[in-house]
Image: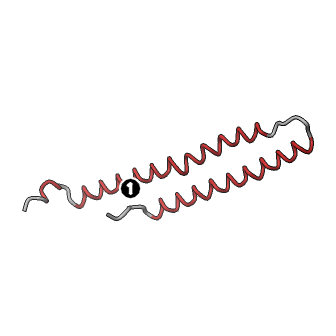
Amino acid sequence: MVDYMPEDDKREQAEAISGFYLHFFIYAVVIAGLFVINLLKGNQLWAQWPALGWGLGILGHFYAVFVALPRRLKKEAREHRQQSDKTTNPHPERSEIV
């Protein structure tokens, strides 16, 4: 069986993955900078709070890209296959009669 995934879906998935990695890279750079500023300028540690809050956003983005999106694309592909099976063979029970 051929796995159905049109070019638009492949492009959407690739853009979502690259968007996640860009988001994660920016997070890592900014949080590292905040920790450096925190360690150089103060004796009270506060940089973990933005890291935690933004980190939760990163986790949500990860879930959306690597869990929810593939599920949705598989569901759409399954529905497309079922729809195409119905149009190519509207009476599958009759095709077995020889």
Placement of 44 over or under 78, stated as above or below: above
Q: How many marks?
A: 1
Give me the residue at 68% from left, 52% from top.
Answer: 24
Query: In the rendered structure, which amino acid carries the disc numbered 1?
Result: Ala
Q: Nearer the viewer, residue 94 or 57?
A: 57
Q: Residue furthest left?
A: 98
Give me the residue at 55% from left, 47% from top.
Answer: 64
- Is 36 on the left or on the right of 96, as rendered? right
Residue to which mark 1 is pinned: 77
Residue 49 percent location from the top left of the image = 76, 36
Q: Quadrant of the N terminus?
A: bottom left
Give me the residue at 20% from left, 59% from top.
Answer: 89
Residue 54 percent location from the top left of the image = 70, 42
The answer to which image quadrant residue 93 occupies is bottom left
- Is 71 on the left or on the right of 36, as rendered? left
Give SS at disc 1.
helix
